[in-house]
Amino acid sequence: MNILILDDDVTLSLMLKTWLTKKDFNVQTASDVTAAKKELVLFNPALVISDLRLPDDSGISFLKWAKANYPEVIFIMMTSYADIQTAVEAIRSGAYDYVNKPIHPDSLLKKIQAALAVSQQESAKEIKPRETVKVKKEPEFKFVMGECAANKQVYELVNLVGPTSLSVLIEGESGVGKEHIARMIHESSKRADGPFIPVDCGVMNKELSASEFFGHVKGSFTGAINNKKGHFEEANYGTLFLDEIGNLSLDIQMQLLRVLQEKKIKPVGSSKEIAINVRIISATNENLKKAVESGRFRRDLFHRINEFQILVPSLKECKEDIPAYAMHFLQQANQEMDKQITEFDHKTLQQLKNYDWPGNIRELRNTVFRLVLMATTTTITSDLLSKIK
């Protein structure tokens, strides 16, 4: 599948090209609209990832031109300005979706896969009647388990609640790996062959959240140029992971509660209800009980999502696991960067264990990736660590 990246930030384009190429896409880049128009002819991309601000024209203008001349090409827009006007303008002009900078590759990949799936479904409809086909996907989940007592207790709870249908609330500091725990629950459940759909409630626009969750029908609002599935329908017969659920507005909390009670959704602009079979796993880094007491979170929804609770320890509480995590991330970084770093020296491992890691596992991963990127020998030494900390 061919993907064109249009952005005058050469570093970002190269990073995305490298990452997407490893995901088996054919990728070309362009730094301005003039070059992008040539690539549409020569490269024939199925999907374009375009910035909104470009040196010789705007991304919206290019989007409109491309949709008029190559309507089958899918567009995902990138913007540094997460305002609703920009998002609606992009969607109204024909974009499938948009992402905010800084770009999170995993989130972008999910949007790409969803966009291509919709395109393939639309193409299939023109050829033959709709068919229901269940495809068992290979698990993408990879995670190293910690050995400290607190982590072992978490894994015991995961194994206990996984096979059930209970809604789970995962609590823990930012960066401790709550999504990894949610994936473990999903993988150990009877829904393991179904989809796992993560949703970051912390970056969801209030005006578009109903459409994001429940989908919309063509023409239901300005910018709704196509039917779109929501997160619930995408997660049907699987798991919907609601990260930072405490950030949802009270209006959406009420709609979410109704869906969980009735097990039905109604896309924006539709009069037809759709039955859904979805397991909810939620996560938060705040005290939701206090949010309930202050009136920021609905008490009835809190009890609905909190049928079982798991508290994930901070990395500071499990420092004995740091060497295992560090080696796991080193292997990941080697694979993604085509490097062959073999080890950390003793002093470096000790320094990693002595640090408090306020950003938890996420901060450790980012640190290891920077170390691997900068390393010029097969061993990571403490002098290199001092340069990035």
Image (spheres, rainbow, N blue to C red):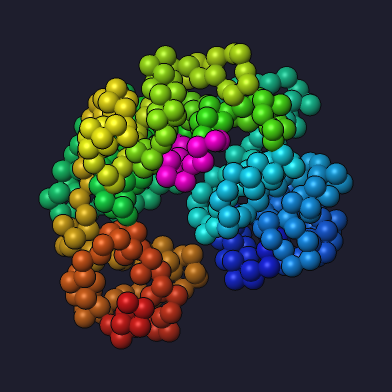
Q: How many marks?
A: 0
Q: Is residue 225 left or right of residue 344?
A: right
Is any part of residue 164 visible from this angle?
A: no
Res. 351 image quadrant: bottom left
Residue 197 on image: x %, y %: 46, 37
Q: Is residue 172 left or right of residue 91?
A: left
Indicate whether 15 appears above or below 166. below
Give the residue drawn at x 12%, y 50%. Answer: 149
Instruction: Residue 317: say if magenta.
Output: no
Indicate whether 252 appears above or below 339. above
Res. 161 image quadrant: top left
State which region is magenta. Answer: 196-208
Is any part of residue 142 visible from this angle?
A: yes
Q: Quadrant of the C terminus?
A: bottom left
Residue 152 on image: x %, y %: 17, 47
Q: Is residue 362 left or right of residue 307?
A: right
Give the residue drawn at x 68%, y 56%. Answer: 52
Give the residue drawn at x 60%, y 71%. Answer: 11
Outermost residue to the left: 149
Res. 110 image quadrant: top right
Say which of 254 and 161 sits in front: 254
Say which of 83 and 121 sits in front: 83
